[in-house]
Image (cartoon, grey):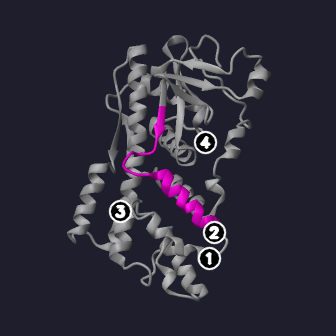
């Protein structure tokens, strides 16, 4: 906690978060882990740009500075910083279901985002509290393990409401964790074969993953590219659905960030918001419509996004 700041939440040491051990280790399993990596890899690219709607160098510098602690790699421009922040948020949302921050104001109309440790933010009777782990309570000699936070200073980044991401993650985790390939029939109609071959069971494994991720269009990297699995048209149809999912995901994160920026602007006297140029949801929807109408060739689709 910084001096002369409004921060009320209690940060944990970097390596302390015992509740994480109680969660499903999505990243440690094959399919759910690859899915996490693919979202992280593709949710940000050079085909879109993030900037302030109204150019404001002072506010831009403040935003960049406020997110320094959340960056994986040092960056000094708004576009790079927010793209990195989107990656961080998306990973936390997929793994923990949400990513919570307290907006903290400091001297000289500055601000920053204090990450609230996973699984410590609670809502009770219209109020928000941070429930502190007993070890931290003892270590900091706190009088109470529950701290009330300012409701309007808390922002929560969550998965887009259009998708049931946690259900998809859980099913991918289950498929990854099955020890007997015959168990994959749970996700398929494979009961018709009494003694399926190893090759057929491998095929069923892919079918299971394809079924679980059909709404978001994930193609399991290159595993779904062969003609024996998907025809070209449906493969690229799924590819476009996945791009739409990624676009909705990052735009939902920016939408919540703009909610935070609105709170900040009221406090420090600015008036502005973040906008995205380039590949936006409207653009992706138009591309999908053109593809379905046969106006875009297969070999030109990926170059639109990469």
Gap in angstroms between the C-alphas marked 2 and 4: 33 Å
Name the N-terminal-most of marks 1 and 4.
4
**Left or right of 297, for residue 8:** right
Q: Which residue is mark 2?
A: 178
**Is disc 1 in contact with disc 2, using a CB cutoff of under 8 Å?**
yes
Of the 4 image quadrants, the one containing the C terminus is: bottom left
Gap in angstroms between the C-alphas marked 1 and 2: 7 Å
**Is disc 4 in contact with disc 3, using a CB cutoff of under 8 Å?**
no
**Is disc 3 in contact with disc 2, using a CB cutoff of under 8 Å?**
no
Q: Where is residue 169 shown, x and y percent of the image? A: 53, 56
Query: 10 Å neighbourhood of mark 3: few (<14), some, or many (≥20)?
Result: many
Q: Specify the label residue 240 is tagged with.
A: 3
Of the 4 image quadrants, the one containing the N terminus is: top right
Count of numbered tags? 4
- Mark 4, mark 3: which one is toward the viewer? 3
Q: Specify the label residue 181 is tagged with.
A: 1
Name the N-terminal-most of marks 2 and 4.
4
Relative to residue 29, is residue 104 depicted above or below? above
**Left or right of 182, for residue 213:** left
Gap in angstroms between the C-alphas marked 4 and 3: 28 Å
Q: Please report the bounds of the magenta region as a residue range.
A: 156-178
Element class at badge 2: loop
Q: Residue at x 44, y 39 (%)?
A: 79
Q: Specify the label residue 124 is tagged with.
A: none
């Amino acid at each position: 906690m910084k001096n002369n700041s409004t921060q009320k939440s209690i940060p944990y040491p970097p390596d302390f978060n015992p509740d994480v051990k109680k969660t499903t280790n999505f990243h440690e399993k094959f399919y759910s882990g690859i899915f996490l990596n693919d979202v992280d890899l593709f949710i940000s690219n050079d085909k879109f740009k993030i900037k302030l709607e109204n150019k404001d160098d002072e506010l831009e510098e403040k935003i960049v500075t406020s997110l320094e602690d959340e960056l994986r790699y040092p960056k000094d421009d708004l576009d790079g910083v927010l793209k990195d922040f989107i990656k961080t948020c998306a990973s936390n949302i997929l793994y923990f279901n949400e990513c919570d921050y307290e907006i903290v104001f400091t001297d000289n109309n500055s601000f920053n985002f204090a990450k609230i440790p996973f699984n410590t933010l609670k809502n009770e009777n219209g109020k928000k509290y941070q429930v502190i782990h007993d070890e931290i309570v003892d270590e900091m000699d706190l009088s109470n393990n529950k701290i009330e936070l300012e409701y309007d200073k808390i922002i929560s980044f969550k998965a887009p409401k259009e998708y049931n991401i946690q259900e998809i993650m859980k099913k991918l985790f289950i498929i990854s964790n099955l020890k007997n390939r015959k168990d994959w029939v749970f996700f398929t109609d494979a009961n018709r074969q009494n003694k399926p071959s190893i090759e057929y069971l491998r095929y069923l494994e892919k079918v299971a993953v394809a079924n679980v991720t059909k709404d978001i269009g994930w193609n399991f990297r290159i595993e779904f590219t062969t003609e024996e699995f998907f025809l070209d048209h449906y493969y690229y149809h799924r590819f476009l659905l996945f791009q739409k999912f990624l676009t909705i995901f990052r735009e939902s994160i920016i939408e919540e960030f703009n909610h935070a920026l609105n709170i900040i602007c009221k406090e420090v006297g600015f008036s502005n918001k973040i906008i995205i140029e380039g590949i936006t949801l409207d653009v992706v929807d138009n591309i999908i419509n053109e593809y379905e109408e046969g106006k875009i060739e297969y070999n030109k689709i990926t170059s639109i996004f990469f």
